[in-house]
Image (cartoon, grey):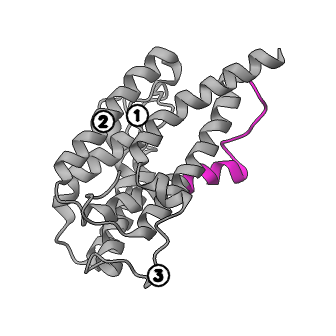
Amino acid sequence: MSEAKTVRVWEIDFARGIALVLMVVFHFLFDLKEFYGYPVQYNSGIYFYIGKVSAVLFIIISAISASFSRSNTRRALRILMAAGIITLVSHLYASNFGIKFGILHFLGTSILLYPLVRNLNKYILFLLGTIIIIGGRYLAQVPVQNNYLFLFNLTTGNWVSADYYPLFPWFGVFIYGVSLGKLFYPRKRSLFRFNLQRNFFALIGRHTLSVYLLHQPLLLLVLKIYTRLVS
């Protein structure tokens, strides 16, 4: 989830760092509710939007970064390998919350699909993204007999994935990001004359994948130690 090392645009790192912090907050609330029974309603209100804002930021930034990367295939495969580890570990830890196609699965797949939309006009991209987002809402309501087409938001009532970002509608958001990249970063340079690369958000934003992989085990460890101490 980071662009090639030879090109760094500080505001992209900064925004990615903000997305990371929001994600950690959301996952902390999720863990409190699902694993320790605290009465936290993360599926509504401000907590729900914290999670969604984090996801939208990740998706848009990943799409913009695709135009900076010298090897999107390598980048996508690295993300998908990390996604596979998360699938395995999440099913071993709690099979009823196992992640089958979460944000990392989605991002890796979308980056592989990036060449299909890379050369489209930014206005056509915006229109296509809108169609996919609207189509995704309708697909979710289509009754199906199995979960084979889960990539397209076609699932049965027994489908379970603690983190789920199907291509429809979320690839539409990714396409918005591609369009924004063409609009704001045609020369692949920062929009600002000043540089705020040396700050906490930009720092963690440069190491997104590592933070993503480590934060949930650390959160669960901290919560486990805390509950042992207060019980």
Q: In the depicted view, which residue is nearer to us: 188 or 165?
A: 188
User: Residue 155 has which mark?
Assistant: 1
> Marks 2 and 3: in contact by CB < 8 Å?
no
User: Residue 149 has which mark?
Assistant: 2
Q: Earlier in the sequence, mark 1 or mark 2?
A: 2
| Vertical position of residue 173 compared to residue 138: above or below | below
Q: Which residue is mark 3?
A: 194
> Marks 2 and 1: in contact by CB < 8 Å?
yes
Mark 3–mark 2 distance (CA, rounded to whole Å): 47 Å
Position of residue 147 in the picture relative to residue 120 (left or right)? right
Q: Residue furthest bottom?
A: 193
Q: Amino acid at mark 1?
A: Thr
Report the magenta residues as a range. Answer: 37-53
* Residue at 63% from the left image edge and 54% from the top image edge: 49
Q: Amino acid at mark 3?
A: Phe
Q: Amino acid at mark 2?
A: Leu
**Residue 202 x/y as whole percent:** 48, 60
